[in-house]
Amino acid sequence: MDFASHLKALRQRAGHTQRSLAEAAGLPGRTVEKWEIGQLPSILVLRSLAKVLGVSLDELIPEDDSHAEELAKKSPKRSLAPAAKRRRSGTPSSLRALDAAAKVLGESGKALSCRELVQAMAAKGYWKSPGGRTPWATLSASILKEIARKGRRARFKKTARGRFVLR
């Protein structure tokens, strides 16, 4: 039995809904739902999860679980490098998506949609998607987040729905 179906069986046996189990364990509401469709929990939450379910850690992780090793690997061994450096892929000269978008907007001098930005960034070799399905949506969310956080100090300005220019 895999971890997801084992967790579901334990949750139902304890009489919890996904949301009530998450709340009892002090976790965000949809966390248990994610685990029951295959995402693995951090090893840090297993103890509180086992306690709420009324089982031991050994009972929580099934013996024939092929994911048991993956759960152990998810312990908090984090790099001491800043998060931006950990996420960066490719050559050291590669730009972050927001930096590349700012560069493209500066060169174009006109409002562009995020789809156009992603295509131009890839064509010019500034940045390419690491394989996501909707990089333009992620870029749009990041630009909007920067605008919301920095206000007038943001590099970007929204001109129309889904279109941005450089300030």
Image: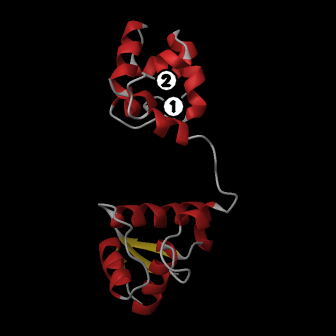
Residue 9 vs 135, above or below: the answer is: above
* Residue at (35, 35) in percent of width and height: 38
Residue 54, how many percent across, how many down?
A: 53, 9
Tell whether label 2 touches label 1 (CB within 8 Å).
Answer: yes
Amino acid residing under circle 2: Ala
Residue 31 vs 91, above or below: the answer is: above
Is any atom of residue 7 visible in this view? yes
- Asked which quadrant contains residue 132, the reply is bottom left
* Mark 1 and mark 2: Cα distance apart in space: 6 Å
Residue 66 vs 146, above or below: the answer is: above
Residue 56, how many percent across, how many down?
A: 55, 14
Mark number, residue 22: 2
* Residue at (64, 47) in percent of width and height: 77
Residue for badge 1 = 28
Q: Residues within 10 Å of mark 2 (few under 14, many from 20)?
A: some
Q: Is residue 71 left or right of residue 15?
A: right
Amino acid residing under circle 1: Pro
Q: Is residue 136 left or right of residue 26?
A: left
* Residue at (43, 7) in percent of width and height: 14
